[in-house]
Amino acid sequence: MTFIASRDNARVRRWRALMCDARERRTQRCVLIEGEKMILAFLQSGHSLADLILSKTASQRPELASLAKRSGKTPVLLTDALFRHISATQTPAGIAAEIVIPSATQDLKTVEACVFLEAVQDAGNVGAILRSAAAFGIRDAVLGPGCADVWSPKVLRAAAGAHFAMRIAESNDLAVDIDDFGGKVVCTAPRGGIALCAADLAGRVGWIFGAEGQGVSDVLTARATLTVTIPMPGSAESLNVAAAAAILFYAFSRRGA
């Protein structure tokens, strides 16, 4: 087992960069993930770790030793202080892994359902939407320009492993991708759309969600074949985009039930 105690170590500098720098993640096509559940979700998806990293304290925990054995990787051991240096959380779990970002091989013409995100800037919202999509059986997502970095630590934490149950792609032109999808395309409006309970969600469905303040752009709204409104009897003017997505995905999963 390799033990590292210096911030000047080349591997430590690289891991710190992967955790903190989106450009480094894009260039290297690698990312650092943290926590037992996240790493287990990655392994269960059939992928292999590039590196497994443990803090000195965490290395004494039998459940983490068992996970290390399952991964087939000999852990790299860091001092507790050095592990905190590469971690994105204030109270690290003491286990992290470097992974190669899975490639998203999608044929949008054939997928049953797809989520299209347009300029959703809040990392928590992006992660929560992906988590809900995975929970309700939607396996594909395409993120357009202006979205939070889908492989950032905050998005990864909010998605709670959904990245490894889905095919996630990034796009420079969502309009082209939506046209390529070719199925029924749904966007939401706070009012004036078809009530969700009356909406026809049969067939292949693509879901468009837009920026938290501005919503879906006119260019993409024009490509929607169905505009849906979630009835809200309370006093709120609108729903958070991630909350709205969860409700819509649940309704989609219940079609025909």
Image: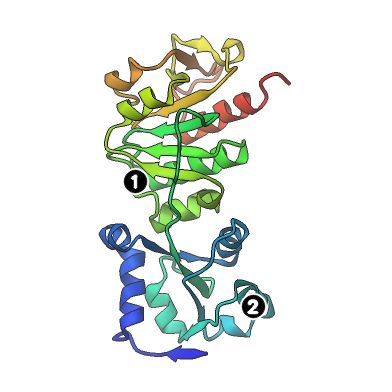
Q: Which residue is mark 2?
A: 69
Q: Is residue 105 above or below residue 83?
A: above
**Which image quadrant is residue 85 in?**
bottom left
SS category of the residue bearing label 1 = loop
Q: Is residue 101 above or below residue 192?
A: below
Which residue does the image show at 52% across and 45% down from the upper left? 166
User: x and y percent of residue 145 in the render?
Assistant: 28, 39
Q: Three-letter amino acid code at disc 2?
A: Lys
Q: How many marks?
A: 2
- Image quarter where the C terminus lies is top right
Give the Cα distance between marks 1 and 2: 34 Å
SS category of the residue bearing label 2 = helix
Residue 191 vs residue 46, the one in the foreground: 46
**Which image quadrant is residue 6 in?**
bottom left
Judge left or right: residue 6 versus residue 96. Answer: left
Tell me if mark 1 has few (under 14), some (14-19) or many (20+) residues whose alpha carbon lies within 10 angstroms of its own: many
Q: Who comes first in sequence, dot 1 or dot 2? A: 2
Tell me if mark 2 has few (under 14), some (14-19) or many (20+) residues whose alpha carbon lies within 10 angstroms of its own: few
Q: Three-letter amino acid code at disc 1?
A: Ala
Discs 1/2, front: 2
Q: Which residue is mark 1?
A: 148
Residue furthest toward the right?
A: 257
Residue 159 vs residue 172, the one in the foreground: 172
Tell me how the rendering is colored.
rainbow
User: x and y percent of residue 97 in the render?
Assistant: 48, 70
Residue 110 vs residue 221, the one in the foreground: 110
